[in-house]
Every structure is written in C-alpha cells, then in structure tokens.
Image: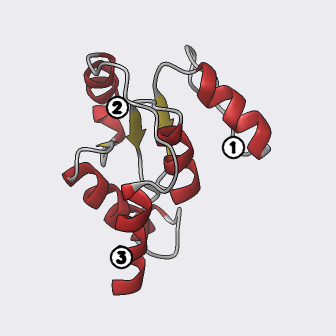
C-alpha cells in the first residue's frame, strides 16, 4: 500500500478529475480514459500498464498503448514496478506540461492504434 500518495481502486469521474487537477504527477494504469484525463490537465503522467501475465487483464493492450505513447514522449511508461521511483524522479524534472484543448493528437494516435488492431 502506498504511504505518500492518494490511491484508490475506483472512484467517480468527478472525483478522479479533482484529484488529477491537484496532482503534481499522475501514476495510472494504461486505461485510455485515465491517460487522456491526466494529459488534458497538463500533468506529467506515468503509465503502469496492467499485464496479462499477472492476470490483471485479458491481453496486453495496455502495454501496447503505453509503448506507443512513451515512444511519442506523451507519457513515462513503467513496465516494471521496481522502476517506479526512478520514473517518479524523472517526472519531477518535467516542467509543467502544456494543458491540452480540443481533440488531442494523442486521441488521434489511439484511434489509429485501435483501428490497426
């Protein structure tokens, strides 16, 4: 259990957005909605994708999403939880990310990715 941050398994969209607004850094699973919300609020975002091999998901689509967005420099992808501290330290060095308005390029990227699957 995390000791120095707010965490939860599930919350309402409104509460999640309020947490994101207040956060300095967002650590999230690889769900598209969570990632887009974080980026829309201009937050440095660390994605820890749920993995099939740990029975967290039925397939590794979150890995694919994290890899693509990490490659584009949109998020910091963390594939091994033992590296999370290093990723958080890296996110602290990121200057405030510019808030997004309208349709995000990331949404188009995700759309292309989903269509290709």
Residues at marks 3 and 1, CA–CA distance in whole angstroms: 29 Å
| The disc label shown at residue 41, or none | none
Front-most of 87 and 37? 37
Relative depth, front residue between 96 and 114: 96
Mark 3: few/some/many CA within 10 Å (<14, 14-19, 20+): few
Horizontal and vertical percent position of residue 100: 46, 40
- Residue 50 in the image: above or below residue 116: above
Residue 9's mark? Answer: 1
Indicate the quadrant where residue 20 lies.
top right
Give the residue at mark 3: 112
Residue bearing the label numbered 2:
84
Q: Residue at x 37, y 28 (%)?
A: 97
Whichever of labels 3 and 1 marks the residue nearer the N terminus, that label is 1
Q: Name the residue at the front extreme.
A: 102
Secondary structure of residue under mark 3: helix
* Mark earlier in primary sequence (2, 1): 1
- The spot of residue 67 in percent (x, y) is 26, 58
Q: Residue at x 40, y 45 (%)?
A: 47
Dot 1 falls on a residue whose secondary structure is: loop
Distance of label 2 from label 1 (alpha carbons): 18 Å
Is label 3 or label 1 in front?
3
Label 2 Cα crowd, 10 Å radius (few <14 / some 14-19 / many 20+) = some
At 39% from the left and 30% from the top, the residue drawn is 98
Judged left or right of residue 83, residue 21 is right
């Amino acid at each position: 259990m995390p000791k120095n941050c707010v965490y939860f398994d599930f919350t309402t969209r409104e509460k999640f957005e309020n947490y994101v607004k207040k956060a300095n850094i967002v650590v999230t699973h690889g769900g598209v909605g969570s990632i887009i919300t974080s980026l829309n609020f201009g937050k440095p975002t660390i994605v820890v994708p749920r993995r099939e091999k740990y029975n967290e998901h039925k397939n590794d689509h979150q890995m694919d999403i994290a890899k693509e967005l990490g490659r584009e420099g949109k998020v910091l992808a963390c594939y091994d939880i033992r590296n999370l501290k290093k990723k958080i330290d890296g996110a602290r060095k990121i200057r405030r990310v510019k808030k997004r308005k309208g349709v995000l390029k990331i949404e188009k990227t995700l759309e292309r990715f989903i269509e290709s699957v």
